[in-house]
Amino acid sequence: MHDIFVIEEMEGELSDRAMRRITSSLEGSAGERHRGEYTQRLLPFHVCRNGTWLYRGQEIKRRAMLCLFASLIDRDEQGRYWLTTPTESGIIHVDDVPFLAVELDFRSGSNGQQNLCLRTNMDELLCVGDKHPLVCDWDRPSDDGTVPYVHIRSGSGGKPILARVSRAVVFELAALAVPGHVAGRPCLGVWSQGHFFPLSRLPQDDDASLCEEE
């Protein structure tokens, strides 16, 4: 079986020939095979926590190649990340999650609802809502710090494929946060597409003031 992930290096970048080989493999396939038919192996790809992609220790800089690889990411029932094409597949190393949400686009819906859309480092636009919820381990002390993620899609193993919200976007979300309750617990969160997404506990001073009699 030929290896479509054998990538030629040209001045630290990936060649057009490598991209054509991968694209032609995708276009020429009749359909996906079950992963059990693949030879399980570790591919020399590493996705860093800051969103940088490395191949054999060298940064992949070509935008078209990055976006193509991003579209091929899958996640199995054990939580491992794969680059999967209809003809070949392999496990890759991901420090945290494969994507970053790097830009917030505030939109107002036709019915006045607030819509928060996040753009990833792969230029994919995700509107926060039922399909792309914000996920955050919010119910913890404020000095621990909470890191929100946005759900992009589910992998074939049922595990979520997420984008971590960048620090700059977290600050923007914090500026939009309002008090609310989740499972009876007070919190701060944001609204988008009619859904409330908690981000952190309500600060103790605010919590107490809400309980004071007027």
Image (cartoon, rainbow, N blue to C red):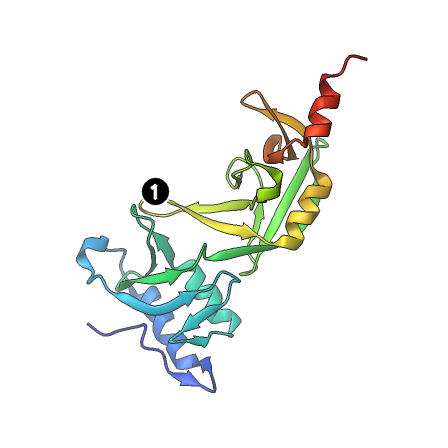
- In percent of the image, x 52 and y 35: which residue is there? 130
How far from the left and from the top, in percent, is residue 86? 28, 60
Q: Amino acid at mark 1?
A: Gly
- In percent of the image, x 50 and y 67: which residue is there? 52
Near-viewer residue (35 or 207): 207
Residue that extends furthest to the right in the rendered view of this protein: 214
Residue named by callout 1: 158
In the image, taking residue 8 as reference, residue 190 lies left or right, namely right
- In percent of the image, x 45 and y 55: which residue is there? 96
In the image, taking residue 56 as reference, residue 110 lies left or right, namely right
* Residue 16 drawn above or below residue 92: below
Which quadrant holds the N terminus? Answer: bottom left
Near-viewer residue (122 or 57): 57
Q: Answer whether residue 103 is visible to the viewer in this image.
A: no
Which quadrant holds the C terminus? Answer: top right
Kindly indicate the quadrant of the structure image that contains residue 47: bottom left
* Residue 149 drawn above or below residue 198: below
Q: Answer whether residue 174 is visible to the viewer in this image.
A: yes
Near-viewer residue (214 or 151): 214
- In percent of the image, x 47 and y 74: which residue is there? 60
In the image, taking residue 155 as reference, residue 41 lies left or right, namely left
Near-viewer residue (130 or 21): 130
Residues packed near mark 1 inside 10 Å, few (<14), some (14 to 19) or many (20 plus)? some
How far from the left and from the top, in percent, is residue 108? 72, 39
